[in-house]
Amino acid sequence: MINETYKSMLGAKSVIRELSEYATKRGNEIGYENVFDFSLGNPSVEVPREFTDEMIRLLETEDTMTLHGYTPSLGNAMYKEAIAKSLNERFGMNYGPEHIFPTTGAAGAISHAVRAVTKPGDRVITFAPFFPEYRPYMEGAGLELLVVPADTSSFQINFDAFEDMLDESVMAVLVNTPNNPSGIAYSTATLERLSSILKEKSAKFGHTIFLLSDEPYREIVFEGADAPYVSKFYDNTLSCYSFSKSLSLPGERIGYVAVNPDCEGADVIVPMCGQISRGTGHNCPPSIIQQAVARVCGMTADLSVYETNMNIIYDTLTDLGFTVVKPGGTFYIMPRALEESSIEFCKKARDYDLIFVPADGFGAPGYFRMAYCIDTEKVERAMVRLRQFVQEVYR
Amino acid sequence: MINETYKSMLGAKSVIRELSEYATKRGNEIGYENVFDFSLGNPSVEVPREFTDEMIRLLETEDTMTLHGYTPSLGNAMYKEAIAKSLNERFGMNYGPEHIFPTTGAAGAISHAVRAVTKPGDRVITFAPFFPEYRPYMEGAGLELLVVPADTSSFQINFDAFEDMLDESVMAVLVNTPNNPSGIAYSTATLERLSSILKEKSAKFGHTIFLLSDEPYREIVFEGADAPYVSKFYDNTLSCYSFSKSLSLPGERIGYVAVNPDCEGADVIVPMCGQISRGTGHNCPPSIIQQAVARVCGMTADLSVYETNMNIIYDTLTDLGFTVVKPGGTFYIMPRALEESSIEFCKKARDYDLIFVPADGFGAPGYFRMAYCIDTEKVERAMVRLRQFVQEVYR
């Protein structure tokens, strides 16, 4: 029989997708250039020319059977070496290729990492605001996701609530920094305190609490932000990465899990990921993309537009009296709505062709998310419209 | 804690992989051209030039953000349309793009398809000989796999054993034709009888028994073989395909599920697959590969070498007195060993640098598999060696 669980999921439409579809429809009416669509987190900068050149070179010169043949089940050796080397140089780590497991993006990375360090029935903690897809990722692995309420003053971690919630049923903690949707990066102080609590509680409970660090926005960090490498603070860390944002390659599904060499089970976690793949339908990222990324690893697309946009938006928001914490990275910002219901606020904004996403689904009711991965020229026009909206509706 | 289930899987080394590693090691000693390695099912023919040209054209002319951007979660529209059109023209089907779900190869296809039509705890039947990865695919979805013993006279279906095993706990049947490891294609008569049993038992049990058809070798069919399209015989069929073999692209992870338009739930199964992906770590195949394959869909690599090789091997085997059913397709053949234990037989063959795989793991003890996706010149030299081996050891 048709699986009723998956069938019932079809009813629940994604708020973001609905808003994005509305924006497209409205764009057909008035021209998409006149719709200020801040709904979707799609990279808006060109892929580096070096990646494209490398792809063409591979296609023109390599033997097709090697280029497109099966990669080893634990990944292409050159890809793994390039990543280990780049992480070691940039963050003073000590990864070998044996600590790198190539995955289909960060989604694949999180899904493998969490299965390696939990068993069905275990609990995992994350912190609001959080990426809503964490729920299906955890539920798909048979896990229960607990969400620590946000520290709305800074969008760092609400440690009191965390310590209340962290009991011995919790086997892993999942963080996302720089964060979608808040744009905030966890500071050195935050990561030190998080590490210290995890060490203390691991000892107390008699089992390791693993830290899963989801960091697809790691390379989009703004001037002056304190955004250190998570795994430096806590050995039992599995870093989950995607090149979707840093190289503007979201459709090519290329990322990895990097297991801290001092992590419990560091010698078996990558081979275990290979076994996990067999049960979920094989995960290996595409061969040619592994080979091309291996050669441009460490490079990024020109990400500066995101900071330019952020500054324009942040200045306008504060000028208009919004409560907002300045992002340290990503291409998101999450101001407080000008009325209690962010859903109502976003509905009213829509009348001005401003497409914002209520952050309720991210665990931050009363806030809304703006994804500013759009042209700066459009951001500037949007700020004029935002000013008009606020003045007409909320003054 | 480290997941003990996955950790314990690390002990069990794949027989095929061990043999392949032995062949590589032996090749380093005596030259790989002198090792007659029939262990691995890796395509051995060039990728069609049209695919490579299309990839280069996309890279040189398309906007990089569109080319490498997120595909819709249910797949690239052009890819889905091209597949539906090709299947309709070739097999007289009536697919629309809404019946096609792009997947990361056949592994991804089977994993999605089976989750859509079962729930954890259900049973699925397959037929020996069978691809051993079916076990982890099914176990990963929480299912029990039952294996019907082989009909060793023809390697079609042992229907008596099947009917004995098919009770109301069975929710799906998984077939693989043309078959790995036997090379046999299910005939029209086989598929008619299978369909008639599934219809009768579905009515009797009061629930649909779905047919999952794994067909990565569909395009490698030899002259005179009766190898019809499975879904034509039974409406409740989900066809699971990969371009790994037909286009020689195994590393690029590109395939699909095609849901028969008259299947129960045909309107919801593809969207359900989109939901299933969220719980397993997202499956979307790479964007550029979807776009390139869309334009060469229906084309194949030059697959004729496989038939040439098969004929040489089949003639030698029968001449040497082996019991063997002539393959209708694939690049496999599965003769009976010349002694009771195929493991012993393959060990002795190894002393002649003939690398064969015992078929015990495929559910056919006493038989061995030869993967003849290698150069014809090497096949010919291997036959001289095989003759010597048989004459010296078994005469």
Image: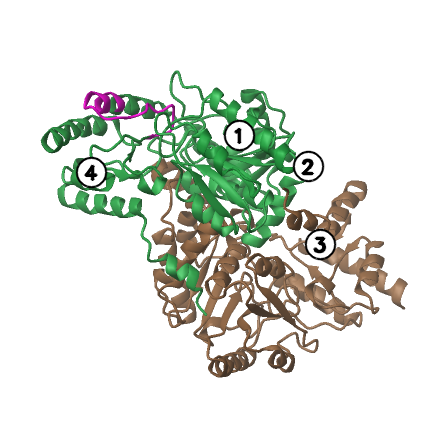
Chain colours: A brown, B green
Which one is closest to the eye, mark 2 or mark 3?
A: 2
Is the N terminus of chain A in the top left, top right, bottom left or bottom right quadrant? top right
Badge 4 marks a residue whose secondary structure is: helix
Q: Position of residue A298 (x, y in %)?
A: 44, 59
Measuring 36% from the left and 40% from the top, which residue is drawn there?
A: B362
Measure the alpha-carbon separation of dots 3 and 1: 31 Å
Q: Position of residue B25 (x, y in %)?
A: 20, 47
Tag 2 near tag 3, CB within 8 Å: no
What amino acid is labelled 3 in the image?
A: Ile
Residue at image mark 1: B295
Residue at image mark 3: A16
Chain assignment, label 3:
A
Chain assignment, label 4:
B
Tell me which segment is drawn in magenta. Answer: B314-332
Q: Do the residues at pointers 4 and 3 share their chain?
A: no
Q: Residues within 10 Å of mark 3 (few under 14, many from 20)?
A: some
Chain assignment, label 1:
B
Q: Is residue B359 above or below residue A21?
A: above
Residue at image mark 2: B267
Q: Is residue B308 above or below residue A90?
A: above
Is residue B264 visible in this depiction of the protein? yes
Q: Which one is nearer the viewer's eye here, A117 or B62? A: A117
What amino acid is labelled 4 in the image?
A: Phe
Q: Do the residues at pointers 4 and 1 share their chain?
A: yes
